[in-house]
Amino acid sequence: MPTVFIAVQCCQCSTMQVKQRNKSNKWTCVVCNQKQFVRQVFAQGPVVGDLRLFVQSSNMSR
C-alpha cells in the first residue's frame, strides 16, 4: 500500500500541516499540541514535497 500524505488544518490554532494518512484519522498539532480528528482534507498526494508548498503558502497568507 503506498504512503499517502494529507494537508490538514488545526481547529484550535488554524495552522495547516502535512501529515501521513493513518487508519485512525487522529493527529496531534505540533504547534499547540491539540489532539484531534481529521475533519477536512485540503490536499493529498504521494509526495510530501508537493503538499509542503501548498501548506506553506496557506500559512503565510493567514
Image (cartoon, rainbow, N blue to C red):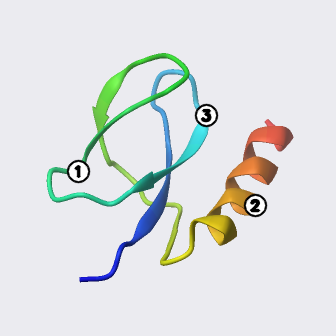
Of residue 53 and residue 58, the one placed in the foreground of this image is 53
Tell me, for residue 10, which label it has, or none: none
Q: Secondary structure at mark 3?
A: loop
Residue 3 in the figure: left or right of residue 11: left
What residue is rendered at 75% in x and 61% in y? Answer: 53
Quadrant location, the C terminus: top right
Q: Secondary structure at mark 2?
A: helix
The residue carrying pointer 3 sits among few (fewer than 14), some (14 to 19) or many (20 or more) residues within 10 Å by Cα, namely: some
User: On screen, 48 above or below 10?
Assistant: below
- Residue 1 placement: quadrant: bottom left
Residue named by callout 1 = 25
In percent of width and height, residue 37 lies at 27, 40
Question: Marks 2/1: CA distance?
Answer: 23 Å
User: On screen, 7 above or below 33?
Assistant: below
- Furthest residue to the top? 32
Check if mark 1's residue and mark 3's residue have beta carbons within 8 Å: no
Looking at the rendered structure, the kind of residue marked 1 is Asn
What residue is rendered at 56% in x and 44% in y? Answer: 17
- Residue 43 placement: quadrant: bottom right
Residue named by callout 2 = 53
What residue is rendered at 67% in x and 71% in y? Answer: 50
Looking at the rendered structure, the kind of residue marked 2 is Leu
User: On screen, 54 above or below 35?
Assistant: below
* Dot 1 or dot 3, earlier in sequence: 3
What residue is rendered at 61% in x and 34% in y? Answer: 15
- Furthest residue to the right? 61
Residue named by callout 3 = 15
